[in-house]
Structures are given as C-alpha cells and as structure tokens.
C-alpha cells in the first residue's frame, strides 16, 4: 500500500451550453478545481512534480438525460471528443444545431509515490540479483470424498 497512488477529485455543477464563449469559463472552473486538488495532494505529502491531472466535462445533448463524462483529449477539443463518444455509445449523432450541455466539471489528481521513481535503479539491481526458484511441475492426484467423488490436483511447491 505504501507504493499506491493517492487520488483526489473535485467536482462542480455547471449547467451551461458548450460554446466558444463558455469554453473560457469552463477552463477557469477546471483550473480552480485543479488548484483545489493540488492543495489536497500536497497536504498529504505528495510533491508537485509527482502529480498528474485528468480534466473532465460531463456533457449531453440538450433535451436528453444521458450524459457522458468526457476526458480532455490531447488536442483539447471536448466537443469533438463528446461527439465521437456519443456515436460510439449510441450509434447516432444529433444535428450540429442541437446544443450540447455541460452539467458539471471534474478534476482528478493522481499523486504517484516519488520514492519509487527515486529508488528505481536500486530496485532494478535488486531484481537482477534475486535468485528465483522454479516451481515443481509434479502433481499428485488424490480422491476427495464429499457428496460426490472429485479429483483434486495438488502441486508440490517445495
């Protein structure tokens, strides 16, 4: 457990039509949430350089109830990513004039254990010098009596 990642999330309701104008406000909200998540992780002893972030918009077509949590793609185009995910999930798209609603924004911060990064060379050498003993392929067959006869195979691990 000492090498497990530490994850913190922050989410905020928005209920806004996705447009060029709203993109600026959405990015500001994502940035504010990212700062909140960053502080939470740093308070737990995670170094800033060991933190990565995933940014999400919960999007849906206006007039529908099913939203899709869209992770920010490499190119940053949430709208195109939403359309691709909607097509993959539902096998159809609405016309371009139908507005896309953003229900909420979410940021996920993942803090990795820096000790693993710092100790990687030592751990690699330790693995190289470890003697591994192969497991025997011998098996023993024994009959076990319960309500029915069943064969159990027992592997010798010595």
Image: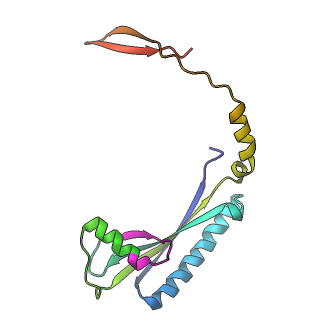
Give the x, y percent position of residue 87: 29, 70
- Give the position of the N terminus as an image quadrant: top right
Q: Where is residue 88 shown, x and y percent of the image?
A: 30, 66
Q: Is 29 within the magenta?
A: no
Q: Residue furthest front?
A: 128
Magenta stretch contains residue 69:
yes
Question: From the viewer's perspective, is residue 131 above or below residue 88?
Answer: above
Above or below residue 154? Residue 132 is below
| Quarter of the image where one finds residue 154 | top left
Q: Name the residue: 57% across, 14% down.
A: 158
Is residue 48 found left or right of 98 in the rendered image?
right
Q: Residue at x 61, y 21 (%)?
A: 133
Question: Residue at horizontal 61%, vertical 55%?
Answer: 6
Which span of residues is magenta-colored?
A: 67-80
Residue at 41% x, 88% y is 19
Q: Tell me where residue 131 sits by quadrant.
A: top right
């Amino acid at each position: 457990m000492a090498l497990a990642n530490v994850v913190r999330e922050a989410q905020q309701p928005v209920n806004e039509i996705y447009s060029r104008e709203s993109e600026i406000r959405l990015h500001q909200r994502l940035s504010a949430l990212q700062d909140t998540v960053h502080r939470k992780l740093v308070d737990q002893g995670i170094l800033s350089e060991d933190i990565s972030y995933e940014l999400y918009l919960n999007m849906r077509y206006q007039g529908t109830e099913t939203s899709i949590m869209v992770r920010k793609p490499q190119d940053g185009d949430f709208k195109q990513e939403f359309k691709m995910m909607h097509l993959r999930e539902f096998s159809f798209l609405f016309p371009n004039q139908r507005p896309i609603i953003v229900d909420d924004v979410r940021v996920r911060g993942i803090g990795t254990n820096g000790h693993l990064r710092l100790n990687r060379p030592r751990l690699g050498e330790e693995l190289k010098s470890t003697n591994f003993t192969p497991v025997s392929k011998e098996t023993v067959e024994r009959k076990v009596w319960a309500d029915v006869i069943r064969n159990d195979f027992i592997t010798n691990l010595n």
